[in-house]
Amino acid sequence: MQNQFTSNISALHLSMGKAVDLKAYLGEHLTRLPVVLRLLAENVIRKQTGSVRDEALHAILAWLPQASSEAEIPFVPARVLMHDTTSTPALVDIAAMRDALAQAGLDPKVLNPSMPVDISVDHSLAVEEYAHPKAAVHNLAHELRRNQERYRFLRWASTALDNVRVHPPGTGIMHTLNMEQLASVVHCTQGWWAPEMMLGTDSHTPMINGLGVLAWGVGGLEAQTVMFGLPTMLRIPDVIGVKLTGQLPTGVLATDLALTVTKVLRSVGVTGEFVEFFGPGVASLSAGERAVVANMAPEYGASTGFFPADAHTLDYLRMTGRSDEHCAQCQTLLQAQGLWFDPLASPCYSQVVTLDLASIVQSAAGPKRPQDLLSLSDIPASLPKAVHTPIAYAAITSCTNTSDPRLLIAAGLLARKARALGLRAAAGVKTSLTPGSPAAASYLQRAGLLDDLAALGFDIAGFGCATCIGNPGPLPAGLRLDEQHQPVAILSGNRNFPGRVHPELELAFIMSPPLVVAYAIAGDAKRNLINEGVAERQGHRISLAELWPSGAEIDAALALALHRDDFSTDFAKASQNAAWHALAAPQGECFPWDPTSTNLRPPPFASPTEPAFFDSQLGDYTAHPLLLLGDDVTTDHLSPASAIPPESLVADFLVTKGDKRHDLNVFASRRGNWEVMLRAAFHAKTLRNRLAEHLPTAHTLHVPSGTVMPLWEAAERYRAAGQSVVVVAGERYGMGSSRDWAAKGQRLLGIRAVLAMSFERIHRANLIGMGILPILLDYPLHMQAGAQVHINTNTLAARAPLAVTLIDGQGARHAIKAKAAVETHMEVELLNAGGVIPFILKQHL
């Protein structure tokens, strides 16, 4: 290998300053490597020294012959991005750890983020009011009233902790904020110019890949290790190259492409790997269109959906108010380092998938998974027969679709044409528009489309995740829910798992914003918009084609609408949220907990005095199954974010603490209170626990006694008897949002291991972060009544086979083929320490 590996960093000397000379380190291999691996190499060179740097660079180059590797490398991001309902539990953990240091007579200030941490308050907005001009103002007021205690805590954190910046409600959602305000694409750090790389505590963080910024989503637990200066260790990923050719046909939008990519890549199998788009078709896509496709990376299972930067990136940066000087710096650095997109390049990939953009058609996905692609004419057949399927929600949501102005403009133009024909949303449909940025209101207004959208019920209801994250507000009044009536949600978001939008709804379709407007008019999900049209008016059947805007119409509206000053001016105005700044925040290095609070409580797993949560769960043990589950168990099943049902055991608990039964907010707002979240674990109407038939929500069978009881009561009974418990599941365990409470709840239940056929990447990491061992099974594990498993993890190693034995109800023992779903040596260390929090605290105590 080259001598530079053991010398000082070889630098390019540019007019803007110095930068890593990737050619000096990678030589002729530079252009053979996927761009994402070139970026990882740059990060290693700049952030590591000595043998750590040398070995990591050797490993990256050694990836080439097989286009695969089992080697580990360190990664250090430039910054971390969080949202309020993931940051709250992370910051509660930090506050509790500071208490532990103070109680030990140590300085709590040693626990401080060592890099910039931005927090967007965007996950708590609910669509309480809609279809009127003041809906956004009123919904924001409801949000601040319900969440003021938690928001005071966030304001405390922003002053007590270094490098933490909180963006108030109303400033937009984290991913759009990232695109429009925070991302630099290249930046100067410690005297070196570098391509920007980051991590975010939301699975849709890869949306920023559309700008050429390498980023992926992690759980809050992994983010804590990074925030405190530790690198995140990752196995050098396989990189799946998606070669795009051709151009999108007229009338086809970025959403249609994103849903098609999701279907194709789920079929290929890219879970946990990196995806990079290349080929001449990429050059035909704007940065906004690329971001829509990149946003769906968790839906196709990948860590990234990366598009290298090019002139389209600079166009987006200029459009959103970045200076011409900065855009020139981006181009100079990325071209000099070999990171600029070349439509004719064909790097080495682990696998190549080719997709002709000209083959993409208008599409939807559903009714239960985002990878289940449908043509519009196939939607009626996908729904239950002999059942009424009225549309309950028609929601133009935030990050996936509204961060590309083209999609919102298209929706507005369809609304204009429908309005001109006298059409309105069908009676009983709850309509909403919750853009990802306040700038959206300005450009829709400038295009003259706000009034058209409002005429069809799509007044802006706020700037937040809202319906997409399960905060659609109450169901429409008078809506019937029974065996003959199964209402449907229509949304332009990214997830449609049963119960995701609303706990009572099992059916939902994802589609582009203009299609959401069309279905709001139709009112029935079984209406075939292609054959039957959208509606009838004075004896005339109005076809979808009659309403659909042309590409030229969209382009003309965009030219009229977009103004670069809107993005910075509107963000600055929204940041001056008077009600937010009026919240009185506590002061001091340690947070003053209120013992009567039902929102914020220091968790036991952050206290060294709780050995059950502070020691390793590895060992040699026999365990009962606490739950037996099937495929596609999502993090919404494991730890819901939706409204707390007033007639639930969780509600009963909160009422005993003094809360009002019909004003309990959403589960996500309670993630600072471990007692609530313990009871919320596995609280999903659609989750089937196969330990027994017809178990109530969040209940299980306590096997030794044969008694059905709430999960946390069964867990406590096992704990009191000194008995271990595990979870057994099928494929894709932990799909969905990157919420660490999906793992924390399991740790509070005493779960030592999860045995599954496959794991989604972020949840697997979150389990390890809580000291729970994910075990990968070669084949489904069928457990009959009274069966147990014996697990020996005394010699745990990354990706190594495990000794797992099934003990059936008669005591017979059967060896099971299994291995640890553990990727790196660092993950083994975390499991040996008992998880991320004990690992961090043990370094300071």
Image: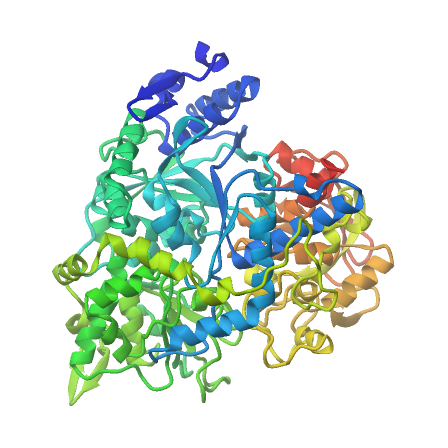
Which quadrant does the N terminus fall into?
Answer: top left
Q: Is residue 316 left or right of residue 472?
A: left
Q: Is residue 100 left or right of residue 559?
A: right
- Specify the quadrant of the image occupied by residue 571: bottom left
The percent coordinates of residue 812 (x first, y second) are 80, 51
Q: Which residue is outermost to the right?
A: 721
Q: Is residue 178 left or right of residue 731?
A: left
In the image, what residue occupies the spot 39% across and 38% down? 240
Q: Is residue 179 left or right of residue 158?
A: left
In this rendering, the answer to whether 278 lies above or below 460 is above
In this rendering, the answer to whether 599 lies above or below 722 is below
- Specify the quadrant of the image occupied by residue 664: bottom right
The percent coordinates of residue 182 (x first, y second) are 39, 46
Q: Give the number of marks.
A: 0
In this rendering, the answer to whether 60 lies above or below 483 is above
The percent coordinates of residue 706 (x first, y second) are 80, 69
In the image, what residue occupies the spot 47% across and 87% down? 480
| Residue 400 at least partly seen | no
Which quadrant does the C terminus fall into?
Answer: top right
Q: Which residue is outermost to the top?
A: 3
The percent coordinates of residue 692 (x first, y second) are 70, 69
In this rendering, the answer to whether 265 lies above or below 345 is below
User: Residue 688 versus residue 808: which sits nearer the camera?
Assistant: 688
| Residue 593 at least partly seen | yes
User: Residue 583 versus residue 663: which sits nearer the camera?
Assistant: 583
In the image, what residue occupies the spot 49% across and 20% down? 58
